[in-house]
Image: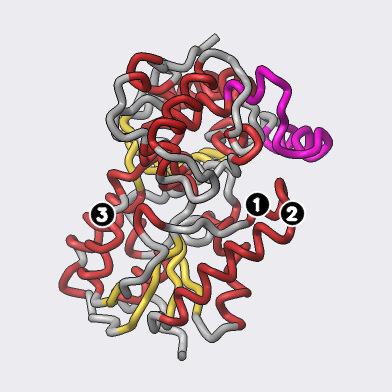
């Protein structure tokens, strides 16, 4: 069984304890933060178990790569501290169960992975994907399983993720372009944290889009719009790719407004909060986030994750901000889709 690669001594010698000090849901100073992480590492009780809302942010805040959030999740499961009612947890586990009904295209050395997000199937078409789209995978057999860390259920991940890797290995692929941010986070961050072999090179679709837009540069027309970016929780697992947001916006002539809740200080969509912790927390986070977008003049809200767009899309639209997925925005920049009227 895969085992989390965590070193207690790294926490003992940490000069900042930023994993918890920066957390917006836990109010602790450096000394208390360090003490709490050591309690968790030793299997003791901690205030963190009551306060953690599974936003993933501490994985990014820890610059020493010691995986604080994965540790919290592991210890929660060991103690039976489920983050959601057992029926909801079971329902989600069943959703990701391999069914033998996966789909694959004309598999080449490089494939496009839709994970298990049906919304992505219609997006990956047109000039941006014309050379790659025939080679694809879709279904539970290629599902990244990251979502189960929200449910304090790493045992499911440790069981299924090696099977996913084996499924890719059987296809003989060398590179996998992940259209879902969670899939890239799983393959590039979560799997290595558990010592799970990744038999291919994972590629974030932001990298793919940026390079493809460079190839289509002559067709690019500046959009001249003000946008904000809705950063998903899974992006904390691929923080090195976050820079691509600004680079893509600069390339397509979209102004990324500067606001309070962005980059490391981003607020997630709140969808998982509503499911796990109720309406009040979700509404509080969503209200702060949307009001921040409005007050800084954003006219479009760009989404990375389809699930985030499903959660916040209608809410931002009701406030006069147009929701758009990153892929569709890039299609607008090359004239393949019309720009929605404000």
Q: Nearer the viewer, residue 239 or 113?
A: 239
Residue 79 at x, y percent in the picture: 69, 19
Q: Nearer the viewer, residue 225 or 55?
A: 55
Identify the magenta region. Answer: 74-96
- Tell me if residue 321 comes above or below residue 159 in the rendering: below
Viewer-nearest of labels 3 and 1? 1
- Tell me if residue 143 comes above or below residue 256 in the rendering: above
Q: Nearer the viewer, residue 259 or 44?
A: 44
Residue 160 found in image quarter: top right
On the rendered structure, is 55 left or right of 132? right
Magenta stretch encompasses residue 39? no
Q: Nearer the viewer, residue 62 or 157?
A: 62
User: From where the camera sits, is residue 124 visible?
Assistant: no
Viewer-nearest of labels 3 and 2? 2
Label 3's element? helix
Question: In terms of sequence position, does the residue under pointer 3 or pointer 1 come before the other?
Answer: 3
Residue 273: image tag: 1
Residue 123 at x, y percent in the picture: 48, 61
């Amino acid at each position: 069984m895969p085992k989390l690669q965590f070193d207690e001594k790294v926490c003992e010698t940490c000069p900042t304890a930023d994993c918890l000090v920066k957390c917006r849901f836990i109010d602790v100073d450096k000394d208390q933060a360090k003490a709490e992480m050591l309690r968790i590492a030793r299997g003791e009780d901690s205030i963190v178990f009551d306060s953690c809302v599974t936003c993933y942010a501490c994985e990014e805040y820890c610059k020493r790569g010691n995986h604080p959030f994965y540790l919290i999740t592991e210890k929660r499961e060991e103690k039976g501290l489920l983050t959601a009612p057992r029926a909801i947890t079971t329902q989600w586990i069943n959703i990701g169960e391999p069914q033998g009904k996966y789909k694959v295209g004309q598999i080449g050395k490089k494939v496009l992975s839709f994970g298990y997000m049906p919304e992505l199937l219609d997006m990956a078409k047109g000039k941006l994907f014309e050379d790659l789209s025939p080679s694809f995978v879709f279904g539970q057999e290629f599902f990244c399983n990251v979502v189960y860390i929200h449910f304090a259920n790493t045992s499911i991940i440790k069981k299924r993720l090696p099977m996913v890797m084996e499924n890719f290995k059987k296809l003989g692929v060398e590179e996998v372009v992940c259209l879902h941010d969670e899939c890239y986070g799983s393959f590039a961050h979560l799997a290595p944290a558990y010592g799970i072999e990744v038999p291919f090179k994972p590629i974030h679709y932001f990298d793919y889009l940026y390079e493809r837009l460079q190839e289509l540069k002559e067709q690019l027309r500046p959009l001249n719009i003000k946008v904000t970016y809705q950063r998903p929780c899974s992006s904390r697992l691929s923080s090195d790719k976050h820079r691509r947001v600004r680079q893509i916006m600069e390339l397509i002539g979209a102004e990324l407004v500067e606001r309070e809740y962005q980059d490391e200080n981003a607020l997630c969509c709140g969808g998982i909060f509503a499911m796990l912790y109720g309406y009040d927390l979700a509404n509080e986070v969503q209200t702060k986030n949307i009001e921040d977008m409005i007050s800084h003049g954003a006219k479009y809200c760009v989404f990375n994750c389809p699930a985030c767009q499903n959660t916040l899309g209608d809410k931002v639209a009701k406030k006069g901000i147009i929701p758009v997925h990153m892929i569709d925005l890039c299609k607008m920049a090359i004239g393949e889709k019309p720009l929605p009227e404000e």
